[in-house]
Structure formats: C-alpha cells, structure tokens
Image: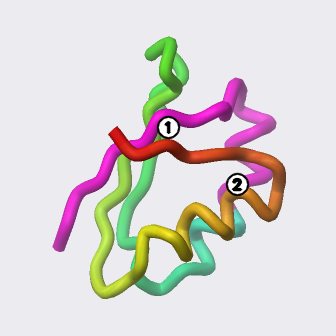
Amino acid sequence: MQSLKFKSNIKCNGCIAKVSPELDALEGVKNWSVDLEDPKRIVSLDIEDIDVQTIKDRVSKVGYSLEEL
C-alpha cells in the first residue's frame, strides 16, 4: 500500500460530500481523508494498484483539483 498527499481546493464538508462518491468508487483507493484545518486542504490517500492520474481525473470531474505534494 502506498500513501499519498495532495494539496486541494476542497473547502468544506459540502465539498467532501461531492468528492466522496468519486473516491469511494475507486477500487484502488483504500482510505482517504481531507484536513480542512490545514490551509492547503491536504487530502491523504492510501492506495493500491491505481494510477494517480485516475484519482485526479475523478476528483476534477466534480470540480476539484489535487496537486501532489
């Protein structure tokens, strides 16, 4: 399993609610969370056998961006 961190433009729990179905639907994403207290809105993911671009594409589909740290 690999752990990744991204800077995001996810700002609130409503944003998380929009992103949740997209990330939960990806089989390679095992766990994920968003730190709304951090100014960079850090998204942490534990992944297995999935391409990072696939994750970014799914999140951008609902209007948010991820930038690798």
Query: Image quarter for residue 62?
Result: bottom right
Q: How many marks?
A: 2
**Badge 2, how many Cα within 10 Å: few under 14, some, many 20+?**
some
Which picture quadrant has residue 9?
top right
Q: Which residues are magenta?
A: 1-20
Residue at image point 73% right, 46% down: 64
Which disc number belongs to residue 34?
A: 1
Instruction: Residue 16: say if magenta.
Output: yes
Query: Residue 25: x percent and y percent?
Result: 62, 79
Q: Hey, what amino acid is under mark 1?
A: Val
Quadrant including the C terminus = top left
**What's the residue at 46%, 28% (across, down)?**
35
Left or right of 37? Residue 47 is left
Quadrant of the image occupied by residue 36: top right
Q: Is residue 60 left or right of residue 37?
A: right
Disc 1 secondary structure class: strand
Q: Closest to the observer: 33 or 6?
A: 6
Residue 3 placement (x, y as % from top left):
23, 57
Q: Is residue 13 magenta?
A: yes
How much space separates mark 1 and mark 2, taking CA atoms?
10 Å
**Which residue corresponds to mark 2?**
19
Residue 52 x, y percent position in the rendering: 43, 69
Earlier sequence position, callout 1 versus callout 2: 2
Residue 20's place in the image compared with 41, above or below, is: below
Q: Quadrant of the N terminus?
A: bottom left
Residues at discs 1 and 2 in contact (Cβ within 8 Å)? yes
Residue at figure coordinates x 71%, y 32% from the top left:
13
* On screen, residue 49 above or below 55: below
Circle 1 Cα neighbour tier, 10 Å, few/some/many (<14 / 14–19 / ≥20): many
Element on which disc 2 rests: helix
Q: Amino acid at mark 2?
A: Val
